[in-house]
Image (cartoon, helix red, strand yellow):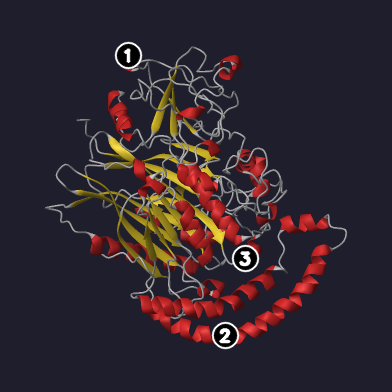
Amino acid sequence: MVLYTSPFPNSFLSVLHSFSWGLIFPCYWLADRLVASFVPTTYEKRQRADDPCYFHALCIIITTPIYLALLVASLPFALIGFMLWSPLQSTRRPYIYSRLEDKNHANGATLLTEWKAAGNGKSFCFGSANVCLLPDSLARFNNVFNTQARAKEIGRRIRNGASRPQIKIYIDSPTNTSISAASFSSLVSPQGGDNSTNRTVNAGIKRTTSMEYKGDNCGSNNSEDSREDKGGAGEPNEGEENTCIVRINGEDSGHMSDPEADTVNGQAHASCPADPSLEGDVEMTKTPNHKQKEGDSGSLDSYSASRESLVKVRVGDGAVDQSTVNNKLLYKASIMKKTSVRKKKHTDETFDHEISAFFPANLDFLCLQEVFDKRAAEKLKEQLHHYFEYILYDVGVYSCHSCCSFKFVNSGLLFASRYPVMDAAYHCYPNGRGTDSLASKGALFLKVQVGSTPQDQRIVGYISCTHLQAIAGDTTVRCEQLDMLQDWLSEFRKSTSSSSTANPEELVAFDVICGDLNFDNCSSEDKLEQQHSLFTHYKDPCRIGPGEDKPWAIGTLLDPEGLYDEEVCTPDNLQKVLESEEGRKGYLVYPTSKNHSSSQKGRKASLKGNGRRIDYMLYTEEGLYLEWKVEVEEFSFITQLAGLTDHLPVAMRLMVSTGEDDP
């Protein structure tokens, strides 16, 4: 299948479309600014409360007549442009595929090596987020604003979190399994030197800011050495690019004294060279939507550390053979005594789960929803290309093309990948109602190649990204859309498969569905969706069964009224608040019922669940290569976009186990 790199089949139509949109845009922009001036956010209200001269009210009185006069003057041109624009949409392609040609610009893509299905397996990391990038006047109804600046900052934070080194700390203490994660906003692994190939050595850790990495992954020049290390140190998983392994010995559960920790300050700062491609991006966008404060480790300009968001803590089952570790340089870390959310409180759980202030390191695939604004999508794409090589954006249809009702905006879906995209298909839900019918909400299906076998069989994976009907009470509509999602996905897999059972040319490693499904697993009003057949074929890591989530799962829908409260306006602060039950009651939207209002802020009554979890990550074991096993390695709720959207991003890392020994 040919991937579409431009929205129209020829340059003439592209020029004609640009001309028509140029006639429409002034009217669109003026209307957007006019409405936005009358819809203030809580942040702006607080600022204006301190204005004794009512300066803003005076500005509205002056600018409103000007906006209205210019809007009326631009209407005839907008009408002409619309008459040209609307019929052109019948020839428009359903998405734009962007591939970064200059790989030196992409910090993550340069580290990828082809998986040969050797060793015990490979891990793949998936992320999903609703980023609320609507036109500014509409975004304000969700209590967020400054869409263009937010788009740029969202892209910066995602790439900054994903491109940091992946650190794993192994605690050699069979008597204590409740080690807390270290309080660092980023950790540096040593590079170069006479013993640079020994990546599993114990080396110095320092408290540092995420800004010091600038997304360079700290290992782009030593990927070969890194691969040699993993084999030599007995770490067979191929999916852990640029992973530094830290081993801590000791009787005291790996704890070290503060004086020891202080001796390593500044020790490893120079080990990771700055990425010159990002030198121009070091200044954070000065958007009033997000106040830069101490403790905001999610921002590029943060100078404070994030609690337990960068370190994986795994407890060894027994003693580790230290003979494999040469030239030890001990990473001395001050381990917090407070119990971490990283600790698996439920011993029957087979994977790690956490509330993290960062997107996972080595994020492979990203699915975003509500990227409706075209200019914001371009800014977001530009930032994400610093890490992801392949991006599909501007997904959807416009006008009356292929859908029952007129579509003013696209689907809002955006997909980014570090692996090559082989095929893609988009379908629009034809049953949208109300305001949702004005957007071409649908499903984007993708097939990616993640490796090949020594027999030249391609290893592929399937990813689906979707956004369902949002209006409360439209249960039947959402169930119909879930039915269509399953049917379309089945058709996509059949149409893109080039292998047979007898002679497989492709091996399917995973099949994942990501997106904002707009229903939760605890609300009584969503019982029909909770019992849908989708959940018999796909597994939800956060779900026990219909109407019951696992105790550690939390809601992903934030209370818009509290987005700018000091307690939650930074990634670190929001992470701390969500760790406590009382904090969640104050800032998450809870499952709806007749006895509770939609706003839960300040409510102390007993509420069902831990908030409305409407953003999902699903996976299946059906239709995959029979000799392989897929299981969840970790699941994260992410606070890095605090103050920029009213949803919590989620991430899931899957381990594809081949069951083979290292060659």
- Looking at the picture, which amino acid does disc 3 mark? Asp
Q: Are marks 2 and 1 in contact (CB under 8 Å)?
A: no
Q: CA distance from mark 1 to mark 3?
A: 60 Å
Quadrant position of residue 63: bottom right
At mark 3, the secondary structure is helix
Residue beneath disc 3? 136
Total number of numbered labels?
3
Task: Tell me the residue at 34%/23% (across/down).
Answer: 198
Label 2 vs 1, first from the N-terminus: 2
Q: Position of residue 41 (x, y in %)?
A: 71, 60
Label 1 vs 3, first from the N-terminus: 3
Q: Which mark is residue 77?
A: 2
Q: Position of residue 148 (x, y in %)?
A: 58, 60
| 72 up-or-down from 246: above or below | below
- Looking at the picture, which amino acid does disc 2 mark? Phe
Badge nearest the viewer, 2 or 1 = 2
Callout 3 environment at 10 Å: few (<14), some (14 to 19), or many (20+)?
many
Callout 1 environment at 10 Å: few (<14), some (14 to 19), or many (20+)?
few
Q: Position of residue 391 (x, y in %)?
A: 40, 57
**Viewer-closest of 289 and 311:** 289
- Looking at the picture, which amino acid does disc 1 mark? Ser
Task: Tell me the residue at 55%/86% (across/down).
Answer: 79
Q: Seen in the image, is 140 located left or right of residue 407?
A: right
Badge nearest the viewer, 2 or 3 = 2
**Viewer-closest of 594 and 438:** 438
Task: Tell me the residue at 79%/73% (across/down).
Answer: 62
At mark 1, the secondary structure is helix
Q: CA distance from mark 2 to mark 3?
A: 22 Å
Residue beneath disc 1? 323
